[in-house]
Amino acid sequence: METKSQTAIKGKSQQAVRMTGADALVKSLQNEGTKILFGYPGGAIMPVYDALYSVQDELHHVLVRHEQGAVHAAQGFARVTGEVGVAIVTSGPGATNAVTGIADAMIDSTPLVVISGQVGSSLLGTDAFQETDVVGVTQPITKWNYQVKKAEDIPYAIARAFYIARSGRPGPVLIDITKDAQFASFDYIYEPVTYIRSYKPIPEVDPAQIEAATQLINLAKKPLALVGQGVILGNAEKELLAFLDKSGIPAAWTLLGLSAMPSDYPQNVGMLGMHGNYGPNIKTNEADLIIAIGMRFDDRVTGDLKAYATNAKVIHLEIDDAEINKNVHADVPILGNVKESLPMLTQKISANKHDAWLQEFRACDRIEYDRIINEELAPSKPGLTMGEVVHKISNAFNDDAIMVTDVGQHQMMGSRYFKFKQSRSVVTSGGLGTMGFGLPAANGAKLGAPDRPVCLFVGDGGFQMTIQELGTIFQTKIPVKIVLLNNNFLGMVRQWQELFFDSRYASTELINPDFQIIAKGYHIEALKVTERENLEDAIQKMVNHEGAFLLEVIVEKEGNVFPMVPSGASVSDIRLE
Amino acid sequence: MRMKQEFTLTIFSENQVGLLNQITNVFTRRSLNIESLTTSESAIAGIHKFTIVVFSTREEIDKVAKQIEKRIDVIKAFVLTDEDIIHQEIALYKVPTKTLLNGNEIEKLVRQYGARILEITEEYTVIEKTGHKHETQELFEKMDQYGVVQFTRSGRIAITKLKAELLDNYLRKMEMGKKILN
Ligand SMILES: Cc1ncc(C[n+]2csc(CCOP(=O)(O)OP(=O)(O)O)c2C)c(N)n1
């Protein structure tokens, strides 16, 4: 880091103001456009909290109930706004509690700046009270991290943190600040960072690769586009549709690619992966060309790599060079931001239609409806299914709410049956699959998108992992809609036990508390539905209610999510039952 | 392509605390053994250089290099094979001085292997040899017949056969990109 001298030279034009490191941190955050941050105080970060106290009107600090909640909330905020989410925690246990969220943000490419307090620099390395080597602990799960030991390094560290977090493939950055650096005074000057010589966030698109890809696309008989979160992160939704419109190519989305195009876009053929749709999975091995757009061939998408895309050439549009050829060999890699590369492709390719090929996907849809979807959405049995609840709620919100999920069966049901009209409408933990993500992420999402309804689907297991965040909802008055799909089981694990472990339900049945009373304790409106006839009415009450709402629906205890590509199997071996 | 062979990775980075950890982590995650590792300041002031020798497949080492390069403070990682580089290791051998006095076998080996004597005391003699690992190893085995009491070998250092320094070109490109940006 070429800190002090560089800042000094650059700053000459500006007027320096003398202030403490803590004030400088707050000012730096404001200089980066931060208006809201999520955190929890403690000894090693108290000077910063004192500085925050003076700017309460401009910089809203949301007091969470656990540091994991702070980071997940910052993630929810970042995912719906596209801005950098900010979380702030104290040293030691405060920082270690933040680790799960940081890891989640890393694997799902979410831009975050996490600030942790640290013991005084003279105590570093002495096993002082609440000293943890946070920089060491978070090194593999941050895009970049740094320990600040001098007040005058704070502005540059923060400027660099924001630049790194939001540029290129986004990710979490952690800045650890010793307590003495927060107290010390210095002459403050702020200069944003726009260049780091060892870091190239966006590779240039190589026209030769565009040329090569164009030839493959023009010749392909059965091309399939795989749409990932890269489209959303690159704000390339329009560019995607232009490409798909002109090429006529069917497009499937990954879990994190959900809402990158409208659900009812005519060429949208559904979701890839383990619990995705039948068509896009089975057709992956019939396609003669795969065009991967801002996705990373996660193993939950590919299944057995040896039996994946067996008949296809692969074009991979990707911003991160380390993803090229990591899991799937790319015949034509196109490095760069898809916002730039897609229009270059669209311009070169010939206009085309793939109606017959698209019809093959629709035929698969009919099979999936017959075998799975019809029964899930309009069950013949008395027990409520997760699918019908999700479907009705999506409708009640005009298919235009932000869906947040926790992790498990309800997550897959939400992803399968919720519908989207606009981008950035999904917040879910994809790569890490973090139970407990949902409730705090929904809080952050609602604060990031106050004008849109935010609806959380959560299981009775995951709800209890961060249930304390109901306190944040109550104190901060966050009007989120919580839909608790209660099956009294760790449903997803139970499903695996049923299918692969002889129905031996080892430690998956839950004896639950009365969630209605818990909601009441936090002064949150709540309803519980056990019968189908009461469902729609309850949903309407939730939709019409002004504030936060908990809708608990008792669903079938042993419902399963299908289709399913069993772990390690080929996408061709997708099971319908 | 799937055959394992020896690769030399040269990595250039900013001189930043904790970078070694960041680099070795990439190997640890993939359970790849590091055969040798040398690190020092490079010819360019402020830029650090790591030279790492690994047995791996071409496919895997390319992925490793990209994952290392992805770290923000890493400037560039180059994957090199034996054909691309001239490399050396240095070895030190300590033998009791009396074994030298008992005959001229050791001195013969020193001459034959292009080694040299660094220091002689009444008790011990230290011999130095620079070369490839198999050469320093061979000398060790030969001398050990007469009793080597200590033997140590450094990691590899390497220099490319190319005319221009790989990094120079890269840095120049980056700086040019910056000018266009601003
Ligand atoms: C922190 C964490 N621990 C364990 C798991 C493993 N796991 C994945 S899904 C699941 C069950 C989730 O149960 P519940 O929250 O009730 O949701 P359901 O599947 O019933 O919809 C478990 C335990 C996980 N993903 N995250």
Image (cartoon, coloured by chain):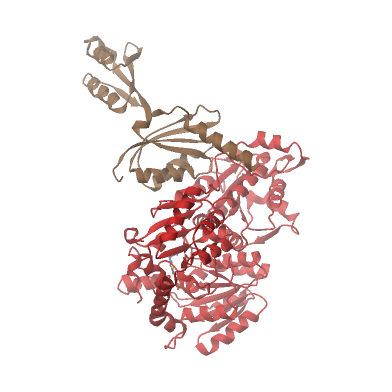
Chain colours: A red, B brown
Work out whether residue A359 or residue A507 is closer to the camera in this orientation and state it.
A359
Quadrant of the snapshot with the N terminus of chain B = top left
Residue at point 39% right, 70% down?
A493
**Toward which corner of the image does residue B133 lie, by quadrant?**
top left
**Toward which corner of the image does residue A526 lie, by quadrant?**
bottom right
**Residue B113 in view, yes or no:** yes
Count of all numbered marks drawn on residues in the image? 0
Relative to B182, say whether A560 is above or below. below
Q: How far across and down, in percent of the image, does residue A106 sit?
A: 51, 54
Q: How far across and down, in percent of the image, does residue A73 sit?
A: 59, 62
Q: How far across and down, in percent of the image, does residue A392 sit?
A: 54, 81
Residue at point 50% right, 77% down?
A485
**Residue A436 in view, yes or no:** no
Relative to A451, say whether A526 is above or below. below
Relative to B175, say whether A312 is above or below. below
Q: Seen from this angle, which residue lies furthest bottom?
A: A533
Q: How far across and down, in percent of the image, does residue A573 sit?
A: 32, 69
Q: Quadrant of ligand 1?
A: bottom left
Q: Judge from the rendering whether residue B115 lies leftward or rightward of residue A233; answer left or right.
A: left
Q: Seen from this angle, which residue lies furthest front?
A: A350
Work out whether residue A409 or residue A489 is closer to the camera in this orientation and state it.
A409
Residue at point 38% right, 71% down?
A564
**Toward which corner of the image does residue A469 lie, by quadrant?**
bottom right
Work out whether residue A328 or residue B40 is closer to the camera in this orientation and state it.
A328
Relative to A559, say whether A246 is above or below. above
Quadrant of the snapshot with the C terminus of chain B = top right
Q: Judge from the rendering whether residue A229 lies leftward or rightward of residue B180; answer left or right.
A: left
